[in-house]
Image (tube, rainbow, N blue to C red):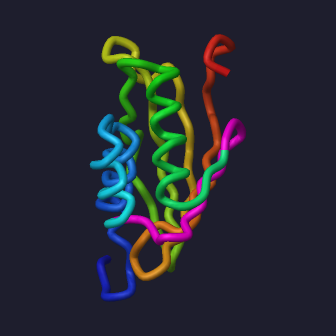
Amino acid sequence: MNTANSIDAGRVAAGYIALWNEPDPQRRLSLLDAGWTADAHYVDPLAQASGHEGISTLIGAVQSRFPGFRFRLLGRPDAHGEHLRFSWTLGPEATHDMIQGTDFARLADGRLSVVTGFLDKVPAAAA
């Protein structure tokens, strides 16, 4: 059901995945500006970052650590109120689900404001 107050979970999650796959720092900042609040915060078991610059820098570091890896949505995103939950995979094309995780997000005015990531499957070499 899509009402004026509901989140389009698929659209928000797809934008999130596109951000993590964007290699160009300027385009990443544009995506962050469009989809995240200025004071947004991201945290997972391995890293945390705040603000557009900090989150973009973190994404660039992940891309450098895992060159050629791509994020993909896993399953169907779910939302209620201002909360969003979705799962993803990360890996090279041939082994796209090498790493898996689930992220929980809070939105403010339709934009991501806080994202908390959990790692569901991580090979020892990637940790």
The foreground one among 40 and 103 is 40
Query: Where does the image place residue 111, in percent across and percent down from the top left?
Result: 42, 71
Question: What residue sits 39% from the left and 52% below the top?
Answer: 16
Query: Where does the image place residue 3, in percent across and percent down from the top left?
Result: 31, 85
Question: What residue sits 63% from the left and 36% below the top?
Answer: 119
Does the magenta segment cover residue 43?
A: yes
Question: What residue sits 38% from the left and 86% below the top?
Answer: 5
Tell me the chief SS of the magenta region. strand
Residue found at the far bottom of this picture:
4
Query: Where does the image place residue 26, in percent across and percent down from the top left?
Result: 30, 48
Left or right, 52 with reference to 103: left
The foreground one among 15 and 121 is 15
Measured along the vertical axis of the image, is residue 115 above or below residue 56? below
Q: Quadrant of residue 127?
A: top right
Q: Quadrant of residue 93?
A: top left
Query: Where does the image place residue 114, in percent across and percent down from the top left?
Result: 58, 64
Magenta-colored span: 35-47
Left or right, 38 with reference to 13: right
Left or right, 46 with reference to 10: right
Measured along the vertical axis of the image, is residue 24 above or below residue 29? above
- In the rendered image, the quadrant that contains the N terminus is bottom left
Does the magenta segment cover residue 57?
A: no
Measured along the vertical axis of the image, is residue 5 above or below residue 85? below
Question: What residue sits 48% from the left and 39% below the top?
Answer: 59
